[in-house]
Image: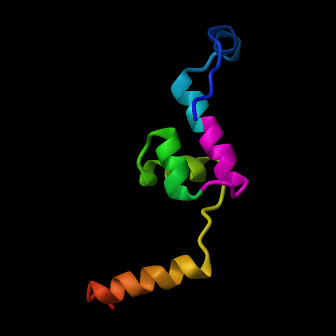
Amino acid sequence: MIIEISDQILDKLSITREEVKLEVAVALYARVILTLEQASKMAEVDQLKFQQILGERKIPIHYSKEDFEEDLKTLSQLGRI
């Protein structure tokens, strides 16, 4: 999907297209519409950087029981636990 934002609007907002992508990604993540992976891809930053941005904005990381169980399984397969 392509969302077009006119240069007129961007000029009034005083932010770049990249900043718009980041703002939309953060908003959709905060509303639990996008996952961390999806939102970081939308913002075109790696997940660690996206987590740092969320932390700066006091937006909690969504970490479900299923995520935890999947992480435990992965760690077990890697011989870390």
Magenta segment range? 23-34
Instruction: Give x and y (percent) for residue 40.
Output: 49, 48
Write down the quadrant of residue 23 in the picture: top right
Write down the quadrant of residue 14 in the picture: top right
**Horizontal placement of 77 versus 10: left or right?**
left
Question: Which quarter of the figure is the C terminus placed in?
Answer: bottom left
66 w.r.t. 5: above or below: below
Q: Residue at x 69, y 58 (%)?
A: 32
Query: How many dots with numbers?
Result: 0
Answer whether residue 74 is magenta in the image.
Answer: no
Most frequent secondary structure within the magenta stretch: helix
**Horizontal placement of 58 versus 66: left or right?**
right
- Between 39 and 19, the residue placed more toward the observer is 39
- Does residue 58 show up? no
Q: Residue at x 63, y 45 (%)?
A: 26
Q: Residue at x 60, y 62 (%)?
A: 61
**Horizontal placement of 37 versus 11: left or right?**
left
Question: Which quarter of the figure is the N terminus placed in?
Answer: top right
The colour scheme applied to this rendered structure is rainbow
Q: Residue at x 60, y 82 (%)?
A: 65
Instruction: Give x and y (percent) for residue 57.
Output: 64, 47
Instruction: Give x and y (percent) for residue 15.
Output: 60, 20
- Does residue 65 show up? yes
> Seen from this angle, which residue lies furthest left?
79
**Horizontal placement of 31 versus 14: left or right?**
right
